[in-house]
Amino acid sequence: MIIASAICCISFGIHQAVNVEESLNGIFDEPDKYISLAEACYWQMVFNSALAITLFLAWIKVLQITIVAVFLCINIDLFQYHMHDLVE
């Protein structure tokens, strides 16, 4: 889910950059014409929200992996300590 969301954000970011560049080129080609960037601004806000959600999910996954790794290390240490007591 995180990878799919990240791929969507990357592709949307590229599309948005191309769209804004085309709009800005239109401004330079016709300086007397008013070009509205409201739609581009709206989609940029949507992109920012999607990116924030993706980063939040990625941090949850990183913390989950870290917690599992710490839990496994503690269990291995306790098991070795217990086995050491049984041998003596």
Image (spheres, rainbow, N blue to C red):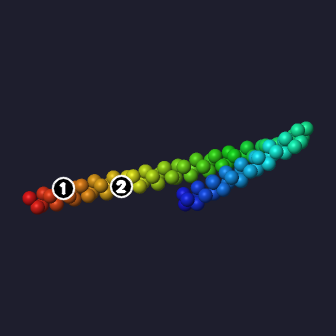
Q: Along the horizontal axis of the image, is 45 left or right of 73?
A: right
Residue at 68%, 52% in the rendered image: 14
Q: State the residue lying farthest toward the top.
A: 32
Type of amino acid under label 1:
Tyr
Instruction: Give the numbered dot on residue 81.
Output: 1
Instruction: Give the numbered dot on residue 14.
Output: none
Residue 52: image location, x then y, percent: 58, 47
Q: Which circle's residue, 1 or 2, is located before the other in the chain? A: 2
In front: 16, or 39?
16
Instruction: Kindly state the secondary structure of the residue where label 2 is placed.
Output: helix
Please give the count of numbered marks on the rendered protein: 2
Q: Along the horizontal axis of the image, is 77 left or right of 17?
A: left
Q: Along the horizontal axis of the image, is 57 left or right of 72?
A: right
Q: Along the horizontal axis of the image, is 14 left or right of 29?
A: left
Residue 29: image location, x then y, percent: 87, 43
Residue wearing tag 2: 69
Type of amino acid under label 2:
Ala
Residue at 60%, 49% in the rendered image: 51
Image quadrant holding the N terminus, namely: bottom right
Instruction: Kindly state the secondary structure of the residue where label 1 is placed.
Output: helix
